[in-house]
Amino acid sequence: MKLAIIGAGNMAHEHARAFRDIETVSLVGIFSRTRSRAETLATKHKIQYVCNSVEELWELTNADLVVISVGELFTNEICRIAFAFPWYCLIEKPAGYNLYDAESILKHAEKTNAKAYVALNRRHYSSTRIVMQELSQLTEPRIVHVLDQEDPQAALDNGEHPSVTANWMYANSIHVIDYLRLFCRGKVISVNHIIPWNAENPFLVLTKLDYSSGDIGIYQGIWNAPGPWAVAITTPTKRFEMRPLEHATIQTYGSRKNEPLPLGDWDTQFKPGLRQQSQESFRAVKGEVHGLPTLQEGFETMKLIHQIYQV
């Protein structure tokens, strides 16, 4: 498989590390608005071509897959260009800095029949996958409790664009809100904004979601205050907890102990989720069964964020 990369930031580096570990993957080209950063990354990962545009990236490489890892405000523009070519596209989340931007990207993908997927790497954590495997054996109703913590001011202080931090629930809360879509079955049939989002005084968001399956989702977002990212799934017989998200424990009814679930080695050797995600991308390109979420699935998570935050 021939891999091309658009972007030369930290995530582009992490993607390159993960894909290089697959022996039959060749890193054939990179393009970034900052050529010097692209050249640095190309040297580090032995990438063949440093290109001056997306068009040149395609012309020189005819890559099978392109990883799009650029700033949120540039994703739409880059995707529109990249969708013109027949490679598979793996787009760093969020695919759009708000709901309307995400919808614009999706519509253009549909118009061009682009083979587009979203890099929701937490779906590929070994902790996530083992919990999903355990849950697949249970038919019981679930209560899925997602705990989020956000500090957009810190992101702003670190150089993030104000338009991105103003939509920080899409840029960053997507990481944990996507777990509601992953673990809750069926469709959302009602949304109860127990403590609604208050943009003038952001502190606590508390939302209850009822699903057609009987599952219940509870989202608790803490803004500008301390708190962990965590997920807990409770059924009548078993309870699973991911705190931190890279680890998973199980507690059975009648026991007071949280027993650790076995994890894979890839999440300690690479940025968690990326090595498995690379493997899923390889399978997608080969036409095999894979676990990459489509751009449509990514958009469904963006819609869920909109349901919770109403922005």
Image (cartoon, rainbow, N blue to C red):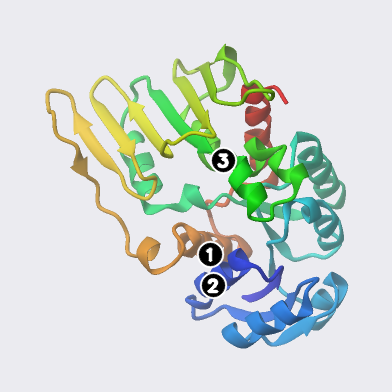
The percent coordinates of residue 193 (x first, y second) are 58, 13
Q: Is residue 120 left or right of residue 42?
A: left
Q: Position of residue 100 (x, y in %)?
A: 81, 35
Residue depicted at x 68% and y 25%:
199
Query: Which disc, if any, is residue 151?
Result: 3
Residue drawn 25% across and 52% down? 262
Q: Are marks 2 and 3 in contact (CB under 8 Å)?
A: no
- Tag of residue 278: 1
Q: Amino acid at mark 2?
A: Phe
Q: Residues within 10 Å of mark 1 (few under 14, many from 20)?
A: many
The earlier-in-sequence mark between 2 and 3 is 2
Q: Are marks 2 and 1 in contact (CB under 8 Å)?
A: yes
Element assignment for label 1: helix
Q: Position of residue 247 (x, y in %)?
A: 32, 48
Residue beneath the point at 73% across and 57% down: 71
Amino acid bearing label 3: Asp
Answer few, some or many: residues within 10 Å of disc 3's Cα (few below 14, many 20 plus, some between 14 and 19). Answer: some
> Which structural element holds mark 2?
helix
Total labels: the figure holds 3
Question: Considering only order in the chain, which callout, 1 or 3, is on the residue closer to the N terminus?
Answer: 3
Residue 77, compared with residue 303, is above or below; it is below
Would you say residue 301 is visible in this rendering? yes
- Residue occupied by mark 2: 19
